[in-house]
Amino acid sequence: MNLELFNTNKTRGKITIKGINYEFETDLTPEEFEYLSNYISEKIKEQEDRMMFMRNNVEFVSVLIAVIYEIARELILLRKEQSELEEKLEKIYKRIEACI
């Protein structure tokens, strides 16, 4: 999935994602946005039956997408934090090895 599948507007280094009842502005990198869009697509497919049942309830679907977006955004932030922690641990291990 890519940016073209969303109604997006790239301004000021940010990506605005618009739907019927939702709008997100994000400052994700293209790689992070790719991860986000793939995650959202996967979760929407998992909820497809539920969404088909509720298809006339646009508000429900919009809220569902908003929740999926927030979860994916948190996952991206956690991945960044994990990378930073791994780098810090690597530096600590190198210091310990240098002392031995």
Image (cartoon, rainbow, N blue to C red):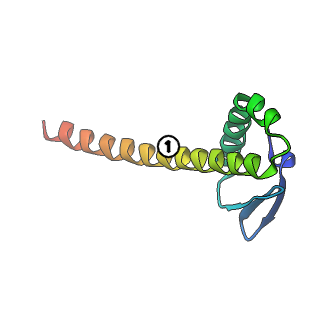
Q: Which residue is mark 1?
A: 79
In the image: residue 80, left or right of residue 4: left
Name the residue nearer the viewer: 30 or 35: 35
Location of residue 88 with respect to 44 vertically, above or below: below
Name the residue nearer the viewer: 58 or 69: 58
Name the residue nearer the viewer: 19 or 75: 19
The residue that appears at 60% across and 44% down in the rendered structure is 72
In the image: residue 9, left or right of residue 13: right
> In the rendered image, which quarter is residue 40 located in?
top right
Q: Where does residue 96 sit, x and y in percent of width and height?
A: 18, 40
Badge 1 marks a residue whose secondary structure is: helix
In the image: residue 17, left or right of residue 5: left
The residue that appears at 37% across and 46% down in the rendered structure is 85
Q: Where does residue 22 sit, x and y in percent of width and height?
A: 75, 58
Q: Residue furthest bottom?
A: 12
Q: Where does residue 30 sit, x and y in percent of width and height?
A: 70, 50
Count of numbered circles on the image: 1
Which residue type carries mark 1? Arg
The residue carrying pointer 1 sits among few (fewer than 14), some (14 to 19) or many (20 or more) residues within 10 Å by Cα, namely few
> In the rendered image, which quarter is residue 87 located in?
top left
> In the rendered image, which quarter is residue 16 located in?
bottom right
Q: Quadrant of the C terminus?
A: top left
Q: Residue furthest left?
A: 100
Q: Where does residue 23 sit, x and y in percent of width and height?
A: 75, 61
In the image: residue 23, left or right of residue 81: right
Location of residue 81 with respect to 9 vertically, above or below: above
Q: Quadrant of the N terminus?
A: top right
The residue that appears at 25% across and 38% down in the rendered structure is 93
